[in-house]
Amino acid sequence: MNTYAFWNNKGGTGKTSLAFQVICRYAEQNPRQKVLAIDVCPQANLSELFLGGLMNEGSQNLLVRHGKIPRCSIGGYFEIRLPTPFSKPEFDVSDFITTPSAINSNIPKNVTLLCGDPLLELQSNAINTLANTQIPGTDTWIKIISWLKDFIEKTEDQFDIIFLDANPSFSIYTQIALAASDYLVLPVMADDSSRRAIQNAFSLIYGLKLPSDFYAQYAFSTKLESVGFALPKIHLIAKNRLTQYMGEASAYAAVLESIEADIGSLIKTHPVMFTFKKVKEGVVSIRDFQTTGVVAFARGCPFYSMPTGRLDIGGLRVRVNPDYKQLCIDAIDLIVKKL
C-alpha cells in the first residue's frame, strides 16, 4: 500500500483541485482498488469538493460530519488521541471515515474520505506542547508525529492506495501527514515565489541548505531518521501555469526552467530523495484548468464525468468547451500514469 502526499509550501486552491482530480481519476481507472483520501488541512477544501462542492452543499455536508459523535473527521481522530497522546488508544476507524459517493454521486464508489477539520488549528497548540514534553525514556515528538501512521496501520489493509492533501504550512499536523507518506507530489506554479517555496520545502523536509548547523539538530529529517523512520521521497513535480494550446507560456518559461535546473542539481547531489533519476522522468507539465477547473470546483465533479456546453453555476451560464475539458483530463492522466 503506497501513500502519496500532495504538498507545497505556498498554498492556494490549485493543489487541492489537482489532488481531487487525480484521486477521482485514479479511482475511476482502478475500480477494483480501494482508495483512501485524507484531508490534513483545517480549510478542508478537499473534503468540501468530495462532499458536493460549492453548489451542492459540500460545506453543509462537511458540517454534518463534524457534528457526529465521535466527530467524523481527522480532527475527531486527533481528539481521541489528546487524552493519552503517547500510547495508542482503542478506536474504530469506521467512526472517522466517510464514503463520499453516498453524498455526491460524482465520486467513484471505491473512494473513502477522512475529512479535514478546522479543529486542527485549535488542536495544534496542544499537540505542539505535547510533542515537546520531556518524559524520561519516551520520545514524545515521535509518538505524536506517528498519529496518522497509527491510523493507517489500524485500517488493516482495507485500502490499496492512500492520498493525503497536506496544508501548505509546516505546522505539526503537516509534519504528521508527511511522516505518514511514502511519496510526495509537489505542484509548482510558474513564478519566483513558487521557486522559493520548493526550495523551502527541501529545507523543511530534508534539512538542506539550513542557515547553520544549529538548526540541523532540530530538523524534521534529523528527528525522523534518528528513530529509523524513512523520509518521503519526491515522486512527481507538477508544473502549472501553462497555456491551453501554446505549451508553456513564455512569461513563465524561465522560472520553470530554473525549477527544473534546481531539481536536476539535487538529483545529482541527493539521489536518495527522489524516485526518479532524470528530471524528465519526474516532472510533468500541467495545463491551467481555467473555466473548466472553476466549474469542476463549484460542482464537486471530476473532469471525466463533467458535462460540457452551457452550465448553470450560481445563477450564471458558463460554457465548458469540450476541447478544453479533454485537455484537462489529459493533464490529470499524465500524473495518474506515474502513480
Image (cartoon, helix red, strand yellow):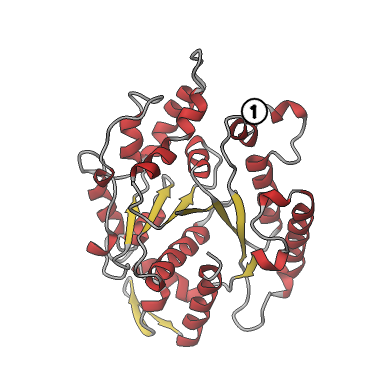
Horizontal placement of 131 versus 233: left or right? Answer: left
Q: State whether residue 135 appears in this view.
A: yes
**Quadrant of residue 304 within the rendered picture:** bottom left
Q: What residue appears at the point 62 percent right and 30 percent down from the top-left corner? A: 226
Which residue, given by chain and number where applicable, does mark 1 sit on? 218
Front-lying residue, 233 or 287: 233
User: SS for tag 1?
Assistant: loop
**Residue 65, position as x, y percentages in the image:** 25, 48
**Quadrant of residue 153 within the rendered picture:** top left
Horizontal placement of 193 versus 303: left or right? Answer: right
Q: What residue appears at the point 52 percent right and 59 percent down from the top-left corner? A: 15
**Residue 18, position as x, y percentages in the image:** 49, 64
**Residue 257, position as x, y percentages in the image:** 76, 65
Q: How crowded is mark 1: few (under 14 residues within 10 Å), some or many (20 or more)?
A: few
User: The residue under label 1 is which amino acid type?
Assistant: Tyr
Q: What residue appears at the point 46 percent right and 66 percent down from the top-left corner? A: 22
Q: State whether residue 289 appears in this view.
A: no
**Quadrant of residue 89 within the rendered picture:** top left
Q: What residue appears at the point 45 percent right and 86 percent down from the top-left corner? A: 322
**Residue 227, position as x, y percentages in the image:** 57, 30
In the rendered image, the quadrant that contains the N terminus is bottom left
